[in-house]
Amino acid sequence: MKELSLDKTSNSAATITRDVPCPFCGILCDDLVIQNQGETLKILENGCPKAISAFETKLVATSPKINGTTASLDDAISAMSDILKNSRTPLISGLGTDAGGMRQVMHLADKTGGIVDHMHGDALTRNSLVLQDLGWITTSMTEIRNRADLIIFAGTDATKYPRFFERTIWNKKSMFKLKNEERQIVYIGNKLETKSGINPNGKRPSVLSCKTEQIGEVISSLHALVTGATLDVSKVAGIETKTLQSLADKMKAAKYGVIVWSPSELDFPHAELTIQNFCEIVKYLTRFTRFAGFSLSGNDGSTTANNVCAWQSGYPLRVNFNKGYPDYDAQRYSTRNALKNKEVDSLLWISSFSSNVNPPRASIPTIVLAKPDTKLNFKPDVFIPVSTPGVEHTGQLFRTDSVVSLPLKKLRESSCASVHSVLKQLIERI
Amino acid sequence: MYTKLTNGIVYDPVHGINGEHRDIYIHDGHITRKPLGNAKICKTYDLKGKIIMAGAIDIHTHIGGGKVNIARMMLPEDHATDLVEKTELTRSGCGYAAPSTLTAGYRYAEMGYTACFEPAMLPSNARQTHMEMADTPMVDKGAYAMLGSDDFFLRMLASKKDQAAISDYVGWTINATQAMGIKVVNPGGISAFKFNQRKLDLDELNQYYGVSPRDIIKSLARAVTELGIPHPLHVHGCNLGVPGNLDTTLETIRAVDGMRMHLTHIQFHSYGTEGDKKFSSGAAEIAEAVNKNPNISIDVGQVLFGQTVTASGDSMLQYAGHWHAHPKKWVVMDIECDAGCGVVPFKYRDKNFVNALQWAIGLELFLLVDDPWRIFLTTDHPNGAPFTSYPHLIRLLMDRSFRNDMLASINKEAAAASTLASIDREYSLYDIAIMTRAAPAKSLGLKNRGHLGSGAVADITIYSNNKDKEKMFSKPDYVFKDGELIVRNGKIIKVVNGATHTLRPEYDNGIEKSLKRYFEDFQTVSLGNFKIDDDEIVEHGNGRIIVQPCM
């Protein structure tokens, strides 16, 4: 891939944009200050390592390619349309895009009779199954920031969301005068990085170590304890029963407790049952005090994709439109199973936030809409470089709590089209 | 380029036209006077014997936003038996109680509706609400911003900020969220629930702020009046669904002291505690109060039997009601120190005493409130029933013998406890035209909608008269939207997008200084990103903003 710096003039005036929402993880911090000088971006304030590496990546000039050969955008879209017109059931996956891109994805899937899934579909599905089985009580970031006096991290340390603690837990001020030293942090899980949980005053968090697969068992035991039952064992998953009892007492005494999980980090078979354990103990505690669950996810626009899919089709992700109506099956229509079971005969992969994800390899015609600096480990039938929402075009993205969405800003020009625009042109040709 | 509708029978209550033969001319999306002799009539529809009304307007229907989308995601079983195939014109979708946005838009149009208003747009969720409304085709949309449990307002009220500052905040919120009105839900109660209060009556204090629902309602009603917002404060009162809430509702009417107020889904707030089961109808008392207080308007929130899902901003009472979930799953969410929501699926059963009496109470209210200009036809979709049951509800109102047949089939004790059998009133087509067109348009300040006079937007619905009013209202012969024919014989023939109605009340923007500091101190988004620009609504080409004037 030929890389060109598009730094037009190094002495051109810099423009500075404030309150920039960052689309590169699910918590969408929106206080970044970013300078654009000659189309090169520099974060001046509030960048985390993840944001810096994503925003400050130099623009790369690439062209669309058909079978590895440079082509015009118009020809590439025609080639895409030929593949999809000849496809019985396309798989449209990855779905790393904003709400505008996702609206077009849904239209395209409906029109071509395709299957839609997200690159983080497994994580989304773990939550969806809980929602559809017994439901839950959840909360959002501003509530945690101002209200939560006990925060239990179950199977996650939130390090994939670098500013989560800064933005929602350790605050200078809170609406209800909740002081940092009044907040208790607890971790349950395996080899978690617990440094962020240290109170600015030095108070260390409680850490209950167990295997990730055993967190459900620990939570079930806590559930028994908060109901007043006693446990007939001295340890659960290697944790002393009296440690659990002490946590159970804290949970009952909390005014507003929160259990935080990250569905992508609970990556073992039937992890949805563990998430359900979180949700059921939250429900039980809410009989007496206030408690809520909070799911940390939403990277690569996954919360956005799930929401747009739900309002346009009626179902959360993993929907097949092949019969002319939406058919939802969270197992059968996963990217993995759809490919393995040969339910699909073409693949359209979209990733406009991350350049380090490769689509699954499949011996079917493959179209890739990805960031120009994506290093693909194979030559797709069609490759179209796309611009990044929130960097090179405006848009909307949902935050991990699935209730707040933010307007994304355009910070620099790109020669690449947006996913929305490519798909819109494609739909017109099918 | 004129279109002429001739020989039809017109019901246009705004102009006092009650079933008269009138010709209607459409030009450039609007209804016009009869054109001069040489004007070219391109198309004439001979509507002999057919009924012409303005397009219907739903003043309270949960069609978009977070809680509706939670309901969709939670209930695949709601959709599995109600799948909608794509056609040459329309997209696929699904859902009975919680339909997909596109399906909801198509169904509304196919029922003769041309505008729908989402009543519970949380400011912190407004962007999603607008995205969903933009993806609801065929009809015009608008939303009421929900205030009253948001921390900024409550702390202003608690610190006794003057009313002008509160009105500025309300005005700012309408502008920032692109709203058409203000709604309050369980005033202060959604906040109180987060502090672990489980009930909040009209004069009980929110423990943290020390303010009562009465204070909140009065302050917001005054703000709405001072800002000149056409639609009165839209109130989902305290104690929804609680036996005995009749007294709270009556006291709420007294609390506003003559200020205009809209009491929504009042059926759920009209319960007494008489009888063996300590649950009785308060419809007569409520109707009497509504009749006596011309400042009050209501919509009913009629219950109809079957499976549905309740989706409400009232997290406190949705939590309390979760024990009755059917199927047994439910969601409650606390949102941004701003609001909350609760989603509880529910099945209303005709043989269940409480559900049957709820059904009867709604109908009693419809029939005992005298002035159809102040009572609107709603089921609080989907909370009392899906909006697709409106034609059935219209038949219940227009056809006494049908109503009595239904009454004979419900729980016997409930039927005996209701006065419904003794009420003879039948709604006329004119009454229906008022309560589903003229009155909602008037209440919302939509001056050129809800009627068929010259200058009106040509949103027009044409029905074949049928003794069976359910059949008649289920399937209009023609629906025109902005002058274009979009539905013929109850089926879509052209897909349009519809517009978003908003207001731009004037306020002192000095309030933004305190808001900016407040957002920096306490919120997890910045003030600038909280606000919704016009561009966001129109950018994908499926939205158009119509700014309605304030009073």
Image (cartoon, rainbow, N blue to C red):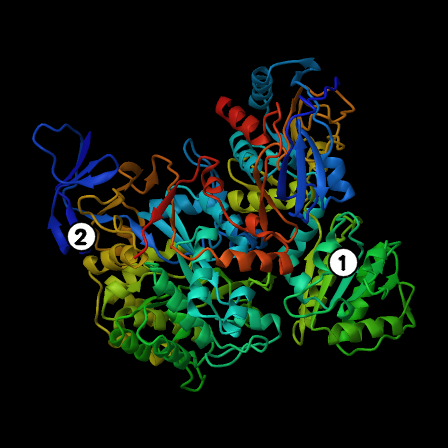
Q: Give the structural element (helix, strand or loop) at label 1.
A: helix
The x, y position of residue B22, in whole percent, is: 12, 45
Q: Residue at x 75, y 30 (%)?
A: A358
Q: Give the structural element (helix, strand or loop) at label 2.
A: strand
Residue named by callout 2: B11
Residue named by callout 1: A274
Q: Quadrant of the N terminus of chain A?
A: top right
The answer to whether A19 appears left or right of B394 in the picture is right
The x, y position of residue B407, in whole percent, is: 33, 71
The quarter of the displayed image where residue A116 is located: top right
**Amino acid at circle 1:** Thr
Is A258 located above or below residue A329 in the figure?
Answer: below
Q: Residue at x 45, y 75 (%)?
A: B215
Asked whether the residues under the numbered discs 1 and 2 touch, taking CB atoms below 8 Å apart as contact, a structural biologist would say: no
Whether residue A370 can be seen here? yes
Is B139 or B232 nearer to us in this picture?
B232
The x, y position of residue A346, in whole percent, is: 65, 26
**Amino acid at circle 2:** Tyr
Chain at numbered mark 2:
B
Q: Residue at x 23, y 40 (%)?
A: B30
Is B117 or B148 nearer to us in this picture?
B148
Within 10 Å of disc 1 (Cα), the crowding (few <14, some 14-19, many 20+) is many
Question: Cα distance, mark 1 to mark 2?
Answer: 60 Å
The answer to whether A352 appears left or right of B494 in the picture is right
The answer to whether A196 appears left or right of A133 in the picture is right
Q: Residue A226's mark?
A: none
